[in-house]
């Protein structure tokens, strides 16, 4: 009888202790929760050729973030800053028709920017507007978390001056001329 009471008491104590604990959320879910009075841009460079190369962001006030990518997987980094209109200069070759993009970074929004050193392509999308893309990004972030690599994609807080952000890499931007 006392043994059964002891098991019931232990079960009740554990039950009450667990009630106050938050449920484990989807891996990486916090990565998508941009806080109030902040906006976010996620920079993605596909391919594995980025390993060992530096990616940096700067503004008129100097370097905002600098990272040498250590992984054999695509570069993914989220940058958070105050909402507003930003001109983002991209690492493109001199003859590229796209040298910069204007982003209206809304409060608590996440904008995704993909630049491809192989062909110079650029892809922009607002998270939450394309279910197919949202699924891709959630899965990509989830893989980093499942592999224990979340420290590599932890959002970086930035304070750019003059709402200008320059993205630079030491990657060889080997863009081939278009086929005729």
Image (tube, helix red, strand yellow):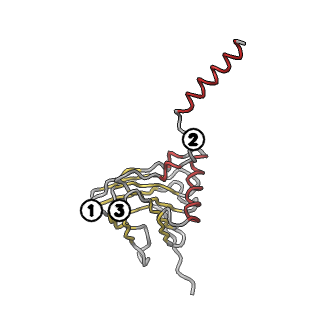
Picture layout, residue 123 above or below residue 19: below
Question: In the rendered image, which quarter contains the N terminus?
Answer: top right
Quadrant of res 100: bottom left
Task: Give the percent coordinates (x, y) of residue 124.
Answer: 47, 68
CA distance for labels 2 and 3: 35 Å
Label 1: state its secondary structure: loop
**Mark 1 → mark 2, Cα distance in angstroms:** 40 Å
Tag 2 or tag 1, which sits nearer the N-term? 2
Q: Where is residue 19 in the image (x, y as percent from the top left)?
A: 55, 33
Residue at image position (32%, 64%) is 164
Which residue is at 53% across, 46% downward? 150
Q: What residue is disc 1 on? A: 162
Q: Position of residue 12 (x, y in %)?
A: 61, 24
**Mark 2, other Cα within 10 Å: few <14 / some 14–19 / many ≥20:** few
Q: Which of marks 1 and 2 is in front?
A: 2
180 or 172: nearer the eye? Answer: 180
Task: Determine the residue located farthest toward the bottom in the rendered image.
Answer: 180
Q: Which residue is drawn at 55% across and 53% down?
A: 141
Real-space Cα separation, disc 1 to disc 3, in angstroms: 9 Å
* Mark 2: secondary structure: loop
């Amino acid at each position: 009888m006392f043994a059964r009471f002891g098991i019931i008491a232990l079960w009740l104590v554990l039950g009450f202790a667990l009630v106050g604990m938050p449920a484990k959320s989807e891996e990486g879910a916090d990565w998508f929760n941009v806080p109030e009075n902040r906006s976010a841009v996620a920079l993605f460079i596909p391919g594995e050729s980025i390993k060992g190369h530096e990616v940096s962001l700067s503004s008129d006030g100097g370097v905002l973030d600098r990272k040498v990518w250590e992984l054999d997987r695509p570069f993914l980094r989220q940058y958070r800053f105050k909402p507003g209109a930003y001109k983002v200069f991209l690492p493109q070759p001199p003859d590229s028709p796209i040298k910069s993009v204007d982003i209206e970074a809304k409060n608590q929004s996440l904008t995704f920017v993909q630049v491809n050193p192989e062909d110079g392509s650029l892809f922009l999308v607002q998270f939450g507007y394309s279910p197919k893309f949202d699924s891709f990004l959630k899965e990509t972030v989830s893989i980093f978390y499942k592999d224990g690599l979340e420290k590599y994609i932890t959002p970086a807080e930035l304070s750019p001056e003059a709402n200008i952000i320059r993205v630079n890499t030491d990657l060889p931007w080997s863009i081939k001329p278009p086929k005729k």
